[in-house]
């Protein structure tokens, strides 16, 4: 059993250095501050993907000129 504790600690320490493993997800409020909105499944066709949100994707509406 002590081996499992050691193995899990080694795996955890290896994954800490992996880029993106500890990347914090945006909250709904942080997404709003960036000018976007959280969408559950994917961004609508008229929106740009900004970043991952807690419930899905943070998307910003395109302004057509």
Image: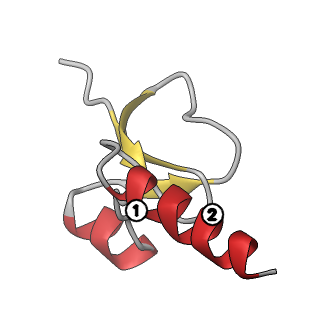
Closer mark to the observer between disc 2 and disc 1? 2
Is 14 displayed left or right of 9 in the figure?
left
Quadrant that contains the C terminus: top left
Residue at position x 52%, y 71% from top? Answer: 9
Q: Residue furthest right?
A: 1
Which mark is first along the chain, 1 or 2?
2
Q: Which quadrant of the figure has residue 5?
A: bottom right
- Say few, some or many: other residues with alpha carbon within 10 Å of mark 1 (under 14 / 14 to 19 / 20 or more): few
Reply above or below: 41 against 35. above
Reply above or below: 14 against 4. above
Q: Which quadrant of the figure has residue 16?
A: bottom left
Residue 35, image x and y in percent?
A: 24, 56
Q: Nearer the viewer, residue 63 or 42?
A: 42
Local secondary structure at mark 1: helix
Residue at position x 71%, y 71% from top? Answer: 3
- How far apart marks 2 and 1 lie (CA) works out to 10 Å
Q: Which quadrant of the figure has residue 30?
A: bottom left
Is 4 displayed left or right of 49 in the figure?
right
Tag shown at residue 13: 1
Residue at position x 30%, y 42% from top? Answer: 19
- Say few, some or many: other residues with alpha carbon within 10 Å of mark 2 (under 14 / 14 to 19 / 20 or more): few
Q: Nearer the viewer, residue 30 or 3?
A: 3
Q: Nearer the viewer, residue 61 or 2?
A: 2
Q: How many marks?
A: 2
Quadrant that contains the N terminus: bottom right
Tag shown at residue 48: none
Local secondary structure at mark 2: helix
Write down the residue under mark 2: 7
Residue 54, image x and y in percent?
A: 54, 65
Q: Nearer the viewer, residue 14 or 22?
A: 14
Reply above or below: 59 against 13. above
């Amino acid at each position: 059993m002590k081996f499992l504790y050691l193995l899990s600690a080694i795996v955890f320490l290896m994954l800490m250095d992996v880029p993106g493993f500890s990347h914090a997800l945006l909250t709904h409020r942080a997404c709003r501050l960036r000018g976007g909105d959280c969408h559950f499944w994917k961004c609508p066709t008229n929106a740009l993907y900004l970043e991952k949100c807690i419930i899905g994707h943070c998307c910003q509406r395109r302004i057509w000129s």
